[in-house]
Image (cartoon, rainbow, N blue to C red):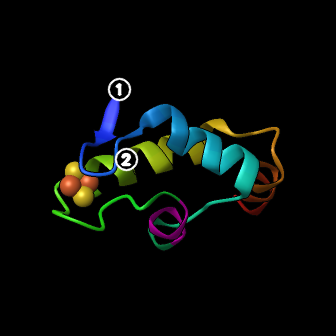
Amino acid sequence: MYVCLCKGVTDHEIRKAVRNRGVTTMRELRDELGVATQCGRCARCAKDVLNEALAECRECPVGASLAAAA
Ligand code: FES
């Protein structure tokens, strides 16, 4: 599904950014994909998807380090 209509960013792209590029924060997501850089209406949904992706990403280095820290 589209999360950010202004930049045409999908939830799949956000999950991919977390898995493959180590994105862990909204700032990094903004820098990588441009999410929430125009109207900003997508910010809350993008953060929810980011948090879900981080929680699901148990096998990637980011997810493993988060799991270890918990
Ligand atoms: S919908 Fe993402 S900045 Fe407008």
For mark 2, give the secondary structure.
helix
Q: Amino acid at mark 2?
A: Asp
Question: Quarter holding the N terminus?
Answer: top left
Circle 2: is it few (<14), some (14-19), or many (20+) Cα within 10 Å? few
Region of the chain picked out in magenta, as a range: 28-32
What is the quadrant of residue 65 in the picture? bottom right
Please identify, in this view, whether the residue under mark 1 or under mark 2 is nearer the observer. Answer: 1
Evaluate whether residue 14 shows in this view: yes
Relative to 52, say whether 30 is above or below: below
Q: In the rendering, at what x and y percent does residue 32 appear?
A: 55, 62
Report the residue at 37% width, 47% height from top.
48
Q: In the rendering, at what x and y percent does residue 59 appear?
A: 82, 38
Relative to 19, say whether 35 is above or below: below
Q: Main secondary structure of the magenta part?
A: helix
Residue, far front: 7
Q: In the rendering, at what x and y percent does residue 61 appear?
A: 84, 53
Q: From the viewer's perspective, is 33 left or right of 2?
A: right
Q: From the viewer's perspective, is 5 left or right of 70?
A: left
Ligand 1's image quarter is bottom left
- Give yes or no for residue 37 being in the magenta stretch: no
Report the residue at 81% width, 44% height from top.
60
Relative to 10, say whether 54 is above or below: below
Q: Nearer the viewer, residue 5 or 68?
A: 5
Q: Which residue is label 1 attached to?
A: 1
Question: Quarter holding the C terminus?
Answer: bottom right
Evaluate whether residue 42 shows in this view: no
Mark found first going from the N terminus, 1 or 2 = 1
Q: From the viewer's perspective, is 53 left or right of 59?
A: left
Q: Which residue is label 2 attached to?
A: 48
